[in-house]
Amino acid sequence: MKSTRKWIAAIMAVLMLVLMAACGNGGNAANENKAGYRTLEEIKAAGTINIGVFSDKNPFGYVDENGEYQGYDVYFARRLAEDLGVKVNFISTEAANRIEYLKTGKVDVILANFTVTPARAEEVDFALPYMNVALGVVSPEGQVITTLEDWDENDEMIVISGTTAETYLTENYPNIKLQKYDTYANAKNALENGNAAAWANDNTEVIAFAKQNTGYTVGIPSLGSQDTIAPAVSQGNTTVLDWLNEEIKALGEENFFHKDYEETLVDTYGTDFEDELVVEGGVTGGADAASSEAASSEAASSEAAASEVASSAAAQ
């Protein structure tokens, strides 16, 4: 009899351990499903949206003499918060940590001149674009760089870590030695101090630098392919992604991004670049492109939603 009781007790203990492990795993799965981002409803409930922007990239994202965030991306960020009915909390970011900040949940949205690339799209979800961009190269007027095909092996090129310029030059011009900096301010200082022959970055940035600093010329205004800049959210955050896409479409109906340009960029670029740079309603290159972008966005949302369902089923 005692032996039977011992066996029953042992079996009950094992069953309890199994149940506790299952509950523990289920809880972890649920936590993992939410880890890394806040849903749209959670942002609304908190009353604040955290948006990652640059603090040293004038005129796109920078802190002015009064300590206030300003710029093209910042103007857009404030409108997002207004339409969502929450306050905006700006989080200063560098190019190299934009993806990290989304993955760790430090920000809800990145609006930091983020160029859409296939590699980045594997790690974050991009919303519809709001600006066109390409790469460009700026150099001193006395030694203007107009091509990379006959690059002097003794010269070096300034780039910022984590940017498309770094990736493009590494893949297409491995013979060019790169000087890598973590911030835009350090990259600009390096060029001004004569540390390298030129600086490669988004053409919008190098054009702005040349206009704001005498003695420099953009000898290569367009390098590589034409790309777009778009907001980014954590992978799988479909509620915020879907809202952003609808918001961008709605803003396009009022020509919001042209207004944004005229408020923040016209002093730097003038009106000649406005239609070339601005993207309204997420539409670039006509209806076909718009359909393609919408399809890509819907595909990303569907894939993320399927992943959430699968995770939920596994947790149950």
Image (cartoon, helix red, strand yellow):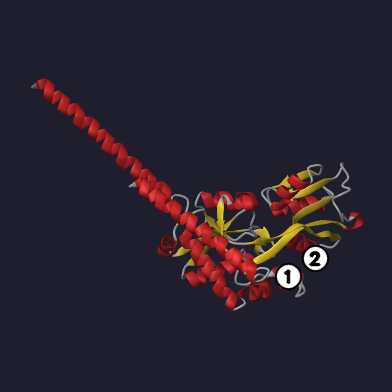
Q: How far from the left and from the top, in percent, is residue 137?
A: 80, 56
The image quadrant of residue 290 is: bottom right
Q: Which residue is pictured at 67% across the width and 72% down the height? A: 261
Amino acid type, callout 1: Glu
Q: Which residue is pictured at 47% across the width and 59% down the height? A: 238
Mark-to-mark CA distance, 1 and 2: 18 Å
Task: Give the residue furthest to the left.
Answer: 1
Task: Give the residue furthest to the right.
Answer: 142
The image quadrant of residue 223 is: bottom right
Could you tell me which secondary element the residue under label 1 belongs to? helix
Q: How far from the left and from the top, in percent, is residue 313?
A: 36, 49
Numbered badge on residue 160: none
Numbered badge on residue 211: 2
- Relative to 123, does residue 274 appear above or below in the rendering? below
Q: Which residue is pictured at 73% across the width and 70% down the height? A: 276
Residue identified by numbered label 1? 276
Would you say residue 68 is visible in this rendering?
no
For marks 1 and 2, the one nearer the N-term is 2
Q: Which residue is pictured at 62% across the width and 63% down the height? A: 67
Front residue (pair 270, 310): 310
Front residue (pair 149, 70): 149
- Relative to 253, does residue 67 appear above or below in the rendering? above
Q: How far from the left and from the top, in percent, is residue 32?
A: 42, 47
The quadrant of the rendering that contains the N terminus is top left
Q: How far from the left and from the top, in percent, is residue 188?
A: 76, 54
The image quadrant of residue 125 is: bottom right
Amino acid type, callout 2: Lys
Task: Give the residue furthest to the bottom.
Answer: 254
Q: Is residue 292 left or right of residue 272?
A: left
Label 2 environment density (alpha carbons within 10 Å; few <14, some 14–19, many ≥20): some
